[in-house]
Image: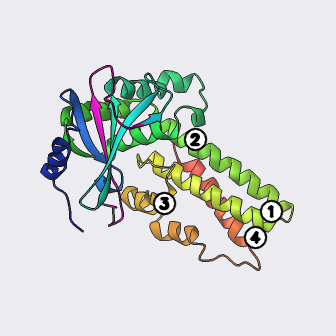
Amino acid sequence: MQKVTTDGWLATLEARNLLPEDALAAYVVGSTARGWDNVRSDFDIYVVISSSELPSTPNSIPLPLDPPFVRSEVFFEWGKRWEVTYWLDSQIDQMLSKVSWEVYEAGTIAQNALVRKEEEALARLGNCLPLIGKEWLDQARTKLKESAFRSFAVVRSLVMADDAVEDALGQMEAGDLCSATMSARIAFGHSIDALLDGEGEYGSPMPKWRPNRFKAASPPALSFEDYWEIETMQEFDPADPRPWITKVLTICQDIAMRVETS
C-alpha cells in the first residue's frame, strides 16, 4: 500500500485550494495517522483556521458549538476517499472549556460533557500526523493535558461498565444467562476503555480499534493475552456460562479499583 508523504498530503490540498490562508494547523487523523490503515481506509484531515467563519463547503456537520457546525470537503484522489474537516480555533477552545476542571468539579455528568464528534476531535490531537502548524498543535495538546478530559473519559467508561455489571448480576440471578453474557461483554468493553482512557489512549466510541489501542497503551494491570482471551471468549462454555460471566465481572471490578479518575 502506497504511503503518502507530508509533501504529498500538502500538494493535494494546495492543488484543490483546500488550505485557507489563515490555516493555523492541518493534520491527518484517524487510522492513517496511527499506521492502522489498510487499502480500504479513508483519508481524514483536520484543518484549524483563525477566522470567525468557516469556509463554504458542500457538507456541514451539526455540533453544539458556536457556530453550531463544522464544514467538510469530500473528494477522491489516488483511489481513496478524502474528507477534509474545517474547525475554527475558537471551536477547539469551546470544546476544551467543556472539559475544564471547573466543569468537572461542578459535577457535570461525564456522558453529557461532549458529543461523540467533539470527543473524537479532542482525542485525535494526541495521535495525529502534523502537516502544518506544529506550534499550534503543541499548544493544543498542552491545553488538553491540563484539562479534565482524561477524567471525564475514565469516569464515563467506568459508569457505563458499572451499569452493565449490575445488569449482568441481576440477569444471572434471574437465570437469564444469555442476557447476562451479553451484559458481561458490554461491561468488559467499557472496563477496558476505562483502563485505556486512564493511559491516555482515547477512542471509546470506536471499539473496532480497542485491540490496537490496548497494544499501544500496554497497561500494566492486564496483559494483552489475558485481554484478548476474554475479548474473543476463548473459555466461554455455552452449556455453562456462569463461570465465564463471573470471571469477566471480577476482572471488571478489579479494573474499576485500579483506574484513577483524576
- Rounded to the nearest angstrom, the CA distance separating label 4 from label 3 is 26 Å
Labels 2 and 1 touching (C-beta < 8 A): no
Q: Amino acid at mark 1?
A: Met
Please give the name of the residue rendered at 63% of the width and 43% of the height, measured from the top-left corner: 159
Task: Tell me which segment is drawn in magenta.
Answer: 35-59
State whether residue 147 is above or below residue 214: above
Q: Percent x, y for residue 8?
A: 15, 52
Q: Amino acid at mark 2?
A: Arg
According to the image, label 4 marks what residue?
A: 242
Front position in the image: 46 or 53: 53
Instruction: Tell which circle, 2 or 1, labels the residue nearer the N-terminal end.
Output: 2
Front position in the image: 134 or 101: 134
Instruction: Tell which circle, 4 or 3, labels the residue nearer the N-terminal end.
Output: 3
Q: Nearer the viewer, mark 4 or mark 2?
A: 2
| 13 horizontally vs 149: left or right | left
Q: Nearer the viewer, mark 1 or mark 3?
A: 3
According to the image, label 3 marks what residue?
A: 208
Helix, strand or loop status at disc 2: helix
Residue 183, quarter of picture: bottom right
Instruction: Tell which circle, 1 or 3, labels the residue nearer the N-terminal end.
Output: 1
In the image, which disc is placed on residue 172? 1
Front position in the image: 209 or 225: 209
Please give the name of the residue rendered at 32% of the width and 26% of the height, measured from the top-left corner: 89
| 233 horizontally vs 240: left or right | left
Instruction: Tell which circle, 4 or 1, labels the residue nearer the N-terminal end.
Output: 1
